[in-house]
Amino acid sequence: MTRIADEQLEYYADRFVLLGIARAGIQLDRYLANPARCELMARFTYLRLDRLGVSFTQFCAAPDLFEERAAVECEPPLASQQAAILRLWQQQDTGVMPCQHAHPEKGPSLAPDDLLDIDELLAGFRDDIAAEERAVAGLPRQNNGAVVERMRHRRHPTSNPSFTPRSNA
C-alpha cells in the first residue's frame, strides 16, 4: 500500500469530482492507483466508443483520433424516434400526406392546390388579431395594458348590516 501526501490526495480527489469519473463506475481508490488510465477509461465510457466497435486498448493508442470519430458519428435514434420515422415514411409512401403527383421524368411534385399563399395566410392572421382586439376594446385596462373585466358585484355592499365603513382617522 502506498502512502499519498495530503496535498496530492486533495488534488486528485478534486480532479476525480471535477471530471465526473464516478459516473464511469470508477471508485476513488482505483483512480488514485492509476489516475491517467482511469481518466482515459472515464473518457472512453463518456464517448460510448464501445458502440462503435472500438476497444479500450485501441482508444488508449490514439485518443484524439477516436474523439474526432465519436464527434462525427451520430447517435442511433431511440425507439420512439424510430417509430416516428417509420410512420412518416409510411405516410409519404401511401399518399396520406398532401397529394403528391409523381411525374415519370421529374419525380414527385406538389399540386398547386396543396401550396399556400403566405400573403393570404398572414392577412388571415391579421384579420383574426383585429377581431380579437375589437372584442376587448371596450374593457378597462390596467397600467400595464392588461384587460380587466368589470366586477359584477360590489366589494363592500352598503345594504349589508354587518358592513361598517372605516373611520377616517
Image: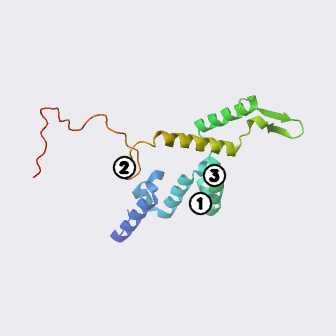
Mark 1 or mark 2, which is nearer the start of the sequence? 1
Q: CA distance from mark 1 to mark 3?
A: 10 Å
Q: Residues within 10 Å of mark 1 (few under 14, many from 20)?
A: some
Q: Nearer the viewer, residue 31 or 167?
A: 167
For label 1, the SS is helix
Residue closer to the observer: 104 or 27: 104
Mark seen at residue 60? 1
Please report whichever mark, 3 or 2, sits nearer to the chain's N-terminal start.
3
Residue closer to the observer: 97 or 158: 158
What residue appears at the point 43 percent right and 61 percent down from the top-left corner?
Answer: 18
Label 2 with label 1: CB-CB less than 8 Å: no
The quarter in which the N terminus is drawn is bottom left
Residue 122, percent from left and from top: 64, 45
Give the number of the mark in front: 3 or 2. Answer: 2
Q: At 27% across and 34% down in the image, what residue appears?
A: 153
Per the rendering, the mark at residue 142 is 2
Q: Is residue 30 above or below residue 94?
A: below
Image x and y of residue 72, in percent:
66, 55
Q: Secondary structure at mark 3?
A: loop
Three-letter amino acid code at the position of disc 1 = Cys
- Residue at left offset 49%, top offset 59%: 38
**Closer-to-camera residue (57/109):** 109
Q: Return the residue at label 3.
A: 54
Mark toward the start of the polypeptide (1 vs 3): 3
- Counting from the top left corner in percent of width and height, residue 24 is at 48, 52
Confirm whether residue 163 shows in the render: yes
